[in-house]
Image: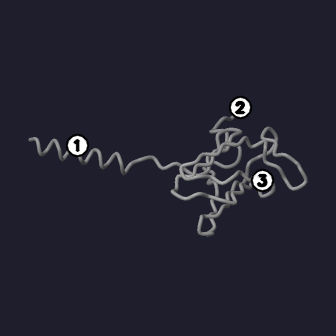
């Protein structure tokens, strides 16, 4: 009976460890972008591009590091700022480099598309 109990506890612990929630590296929540570096490597030369025109360049992101930024700080080449209240989010990408110089390229996967995905299904007035 003790062996069965020990075996059940070991299986439960192993299952909990294996089912640890894996979060996406790019997360949109309303007007806020959160970048998670869940790797054991520092990301350098980080650049985040929104809708192929607006960008930010946060400092290096350390292992297990988190960077948060409001979308309104993204700037285009001529100084135009992204306006979350009036502009639709169509594309979000991150590029960076690993310590060995190997490139990192991530793209945010929209589930519903555009503002509906970023606002979490908020529909507002019809």
Q: Residues within 10 Å of mark 3 (few under 14, many from 20)?
A: many
Q: What's the distance in space between the residues labelled 2 and 1, CA to CA?
A: 47 Å
The reply, left or right, for residue 1 in relation to residue 99 is left
Which residue does the image show at 77% across and 46% down from the upper left?
88
Q: Disc 1 on helix, strand or loop?
A: helix
For marks 2 and 3 on the same chain, the one whose residue lies earlier in the sequence:
3
State whether residue 9 appears in this view: yes
Q: Residues within 10 Å of mark 2 (few under 14, many from 20)?
A: few
Of the numbered discs in the image, which one, if any, rests on residue 124? 2
> What colour scheme governs how the chains and residues are painted in the rendered image of this protein?
one colour
Q: Nearer the observer, disc 2 or disc 1? A: 1
For marks 2 and 1 on the same chain, the one whose residue lies earlier in the sequence:
1
- Among the 4 quarters of the image, the one containing residue 91: bottom right
Q: What's the distance in space between the residues labelled 1 and 3, CA to CA?
A: 49 Å
Q: Nearer the observer, disc 2 or disc 3? A: 3
Q: Are marks 1 and 3 in contact (CB under 8 Å)?
A: no
Could you tell me which quadrant the C terminus lies in?
A: top right
The reply, left or right, for residue 37 in relation to residue 58 is left
Could you tell me which quadrant the N terminus lies in?
A: top left
Which residue does the image show at 62% across and 50% down from the upper left?
26
Which residue does the image show at 82% across and 49% down from the upper left?
75
Q: Disc 3 on helix, strand or loop?
A: strand
For marks 1 and 3 on the same chain, the one whose residue lies earlier in the sequence:
1
What is the residue that sits farthest to the top in this orientation?
125
Of the numbered discs in the image, which one, if any, rests on residue 9? 1
- Residue 47 at x, y = what percent? 72, 57
- Residue 21 at x, y = what percent? 45, 46
Of the numbered discs in the image, which one, if any, rests on residue 55? 3
Of the numbered discs in the image, which one, if any, rests on residue 49? none
């Amino acid at each position: 009976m003790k062996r069965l109990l020990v075996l059940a506890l070991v299986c439960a612990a192993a299952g909990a460890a294996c089912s640890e929630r894996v979060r996406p590296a790019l997360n949109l929540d309303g007007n806020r972008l959160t970048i998670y570096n869940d790797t054991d490597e520092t990301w350098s030369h980080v650049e985040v591009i929104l809708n192929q025109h607006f960008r930010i360049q946060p400092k290096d992101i350390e292992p297990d590091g988190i960077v948060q930024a409001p979308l309104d700080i993204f700037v285009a080449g001529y100084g135009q700022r992204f306006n979350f209240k009036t502009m639709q989010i169509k594309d979000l990408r991150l590029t960076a480099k690993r310590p060995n110089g190997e490139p990192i390229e991530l793209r945010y996967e929209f589930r519903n598309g555009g503002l509906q995905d970023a606002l979490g299904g908020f529909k507002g007035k019809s």
